[in-house]
Amino acid sequence: MSRDAKTADAARSYHEGRREELVQIRRSRTDEYWKSPDELHGRTRSSGEFGGALPAPGDIPPAEATRRDFLALMGFTLGAASLAGCRAPVQHAIPLLESSDQIVPGVANYYATTCGGCPSACSLLVKQRDGRCIKIEGKDD
């Protein structure tokens, strides 16, 4: 065999070996996901409340309710139910049916009047906007 033939055979055998390795790399197993290097190398580390696994439903003892817990729960329920039942009455704004020529929308008018609640008839100053009183204060004489 010539030197070129030996080189070609060596190269062919080298490449065939490489092809097998490449095929093996392509035939990888399914994707695996891990969260830590310990999990990657197969070591498990138990941490947390349950030590790596959740307990079965029958393993947890039932919580014993005391009379105090029951009364606290009933008090909360009663308070929530009573607040849900409280509603303010609905008030509707009724516009003026016939407006005066002196009323300009958005402009306040001031009127002087007297109080009819007592016999002394105290003087008052009333601020009125859009036909409705918005402020009543005592007038200094």
Image (tube, rainbow, N blue to C red):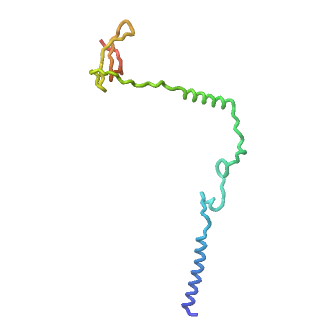
Left of 70 or right of it: where is 85? left
Choose between 124 and 116: the one closer to the eye.
Answer: 116
How many marks the image carries: the answer is 0
**Which quadrant does the C terminus fall into?**
top left
Which quadrant of the view contains residue 73? top right
Q: Position of residue 57 (x, y in %)?
A: 70, 45
Image side of residue 104 versus residue 69, left or right: left
Residue under the image location 70 percent in, 47 percent down = 56
Where residue 35 sits, quadrant-wise, is bottom right
Measured along the vertical axis of the image, is residue 27 above or below residue 55? below
Q: x, y percentage for residue 120?
A: 36, 7
Name the side, left or right, on which 31 lies relative to 61: left
Give x and y (percent) for residue 130: 33, 23
Q: Quadrant of the N terminus?
A: bottom right
Q: Residue at x 30, y 26 (%)?
A: 105
- At 34% from the left and 15% from the top, the residue drawn is 138
Determine the image quadrant of residue 115.
top left
Q: Which residue in the rendered view is the most extreme toward the top?
A: 119
Q: Is residue 102 above or below residue 28?
A: above
Q: Give the answer, above or below, for where 121 lies relative to 104.
A: above
The location of residue 52, given as percent across then percent down, is 66, 52
| In the image, farthest residue toward the left | 101
Outermost residue, front side: 97
The residue lying toward the viewer, choosing from 80 and 55, is: 80
